[in-house]
Image: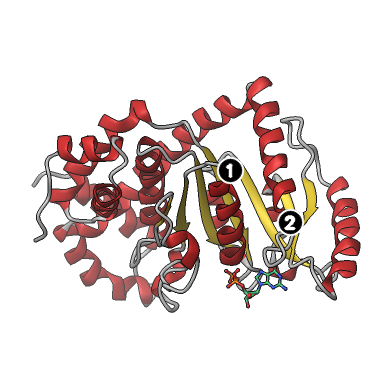
Amino acid sequence: MRKRHSPETYQKGILSGDRVLLSQAITLVESSLESDQGLASELVQSILPHSGNSIRIGITGVPGVGKSTFIEAFGKMLLDQGKKVAVLAVDPSSQLTRGSILGDKTRMEGLSTDKRAFVRPSPSGKTLGGVSGATRESMLLCEAAGFDVILVETVGVGQSETAVKNMVDFFLLLMLSGAGDELQGIKKGIMEMADALVIHKADGDNFEQSRKAKANYQNALHLFAESGKSWQTQVLLASSISGFGLEKVWDLILEYEAKMKSNGFWMSNRSVQRLNWLEDQIQFLLGQTFQKNPKVKKMLELERPRVQSGELNPGTLAKKLIHLMFSNS
Ligand code: GDP
């Protein structure tokens, strides 16, 4: 087993901005070892008063839309403005594909090697519940280490957008022009979740088409119901290759921050998110405890064929298993 430090060592290291200790602490919160989980919880609890001071931005879009190129260019622009930027990822599909979305070393090379930035791939081999719990805690650790902008990347194809939307202040959807109105595999629900759409790769021959797409999306968004927080989803153009529009994206995020802080939504949203987080974690831990229980495992193995054949009612077995999990005998 790997050597672990005391909670105080991690805490001191993180608060002084020590990136090695920050990395090791994130490894701890990602760990599924029971011995690590106690230490991780103690650590996260201890840094809690030092967290919460960043702007948390979620970034999503289909593979190939340019998320990592955007994060690299946008992140570097923020570094040049004196910000400290951390990049985290939520990618529950990584176990099925070629590794985590930030795992490829060639992605975000500039940011990864810059001392003012911190890039962390998605924890691999975990379910969405495990990944999003670890990412939320990693976010708090990054904040305590002094990072003032946290970018959370996710692939816009599954349930992970909802998980990310539930942990960030601002949710950005990257899109491409030229795919017409068929939403490029992005579900309408994800568009509704977004605080801004960015028509990406608005450069070269693509520029005119991007301008048209912007107008189309703007019209489509007017059909959506008001979000109830006095914010109309904005559509912007950007190119991460030329740098066009990146400043505007940041200005919009700052405008959103100012508005939502003054109308109270910023803090109330974070409070709601904390309660959602609690719910998620309860569900996740219950599921884990259930699956790990040896008595449950044994009965499941024994009775599964009878459910499969239609002989035993699934609901009856489920109740029996839950009962078994909570029984002490
Ligand atoms: P991801 O899968 O969403 O992370 O997409 P990548 O960042 O890997 O980019 C996919 C491809 O789009 C790469 O070949 C990039 O060079 C290209 N790309 C990214 N951003 C831009 C842009 O602003 N303009 C143009 N023309 N190409 C871009």
> Which numbered disc covers residue 52?
none
Task: Give the amino acid type for the residue marked by disc 1 in the picture.
Answer: Gln
- Residue 106 lies, in percent from the top left, at 46, 74
Horizontal side of residue 150 vs 31, given as left or right: right
Horizontal side of residue 162 vs 329, given as left or right: right
Q: Quadrant of residue 45?
A: top left
Q: N-terminal of the two: label 1 or label 2?
A: 1
Residues under labels 1 and 2: Cα distance? 21 Å
Query: Mark 2 — residue?
Result: 198
Label 2 environment density (alpha carbons within 10 Å; few <14, some 14–19, many ≥20): many
Query: Mark 1 — residue?
Result: 81
Please name the residue shown 90% across and 52% down the image: 219
Q: Would you place residue 42 above or below residue 176 in this image?
A: above
Label 1 environment density (alpha carbons within 10 Å; few <14, some 14–19, many ≥20): few
- Residue 118 lies, in percent from the top left, at 41, 53
- Residue 92 lies, in percent from the top left, at 44, 64
Q: Quadrant of residue 39?
A: top left
As helix, strand or loop, the secondary structure at mark 2 comes to strand
Residue closest to the eye, 100 or 85 = 85
- Within 8 Å of ligand 1, the CB of disc 2? no
Mark yes or no: residue 214 visible.
yes
Please name the residue shown 73% across and 70% down the image: 184
Q: Give the quadrant of ligand 1.
A: bottom right
Please name the residue shown 37% across and 77% down the image: 309
As helix, strand or loop, the secondary structure at mark 1 comes to loop
Scheme of image coloration: secondary structure
